[in-house]
Amino acid sequence: MSKQYEQLINELSDDLKRSNSRRLLSPIAISFIWVSMALLLTGAWIYWEQPFRYEVVAQFLATPLFFTELVIGFFAISLICIGAFKSTVPGESKTLLKVGVACYLFWLAIIFSGYLSPILPPSTSGTRYECSMETVYYGIALAIVTAMLMRRRYTFQPLITAPFVAFLVVTIPAYLMQMACIYEVHHAFSHHLLPAWITAIVLSPALYWLFNKDV
């Protein structure tokens, strides 16, 4: 390397050290913050619209399968979130995304097991007359915020990141509706999960287009 180029590199390094540039948070750190804030703020918004089922805490503590459903759902959201943020970095492992998807499918299996045997006793407690629309607009709001965070990280693999982000943001309100709304398997499918999946399918190409603008 010539002395001229060596001097140029040293000058650029010195400029970088003196600059006020800051490092981005790690995918795990930003995922922890995102999941915590998304659950808390979306939960608060849902509660503001209408309180959660009054007996949800007792159901959580007294029904092992309902407890398992909520724990597995939380792990699915957390792992997919970490995996989605890590997918913005080239060469990162997709293991967490795969484990997160496996947890998501397990979560669905627990919910749909209610067709064979109800997890909770039949009840109209917590009935929300616009829960399907709530799932949609909470998901869209989360998508906007998440897209802003993703674009700051410069998304190198939008084809992978976009659909996972889309399904992640709509899963948050669908998950919370299992605690806030009437608990009945067909209602969960038709009013919480199905609207969430349709919204995710619509959001995926929009997010792909947005992320692809940065590549």
Image (cartoon, rainbow, N blue to C red):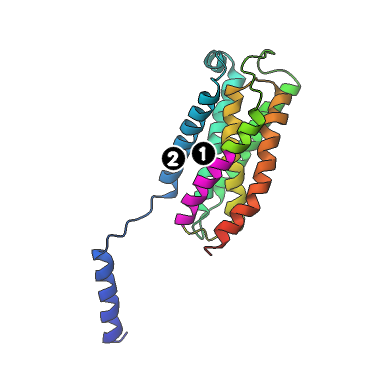
Q: Nearer the viewer, residue 42 or 137?
A: 137
- Please tell me whether residue 178 is drawn above or below residue 10 in the rendered image: above
Image quarter hosting the N terminus: bottom left
Check if residue 149 falls in the magenta segment.
yes
Residue range (magenta): 139-153
Find residue 116 and report its horizontal and vertical position in percent: 76, 21
Q: Residues within 10 Å of mark 1 (few under 14, many from 20)?
A: many
Say which mark, if any, is on residue 78. 1
Alpha-carbon span between mark 2 and mark 1: 7 Å
Question: Can residue 199 be seen?
Answer: yes
- Provide the residue designation for mark 2: 32
- Please tell me whether residue 61 is drawn above or below residue 152 in the rendered image: above
Report the residue at 31% width, 60% height from top: 21
Element under disc 1: helix
Q: Nearer the viewer, residue 56 or 92?
A: 56
Report the residue at 65% width, 27% height from top: 130
Q: Earlier in the sequence, mark 2 or mark 1?
A: 2
Find residue 61 and report its horizontal and vertical position in percent: 53, 15
Check if residue 7 falls in the magenta segment.
no
Contact (CB < 8 A) between labels 2 and 1? Answer: yes
Q: Horizontally, is 186 left or right of 131 in the view?
A: right
Report the residue at 67% width, 13% height from top: 123
State the count of labels.
Answer: 2
Say which mark, if any, is on residue 15. none
Element under disc 2: helix
Find residue 10 and report its horizontal and vertical position in percent: 26, 75
Find residue 98 and report its horizontal and vertical position in percent: 60, 45
Q: Main secondary structure of the magenta part?
A: helix
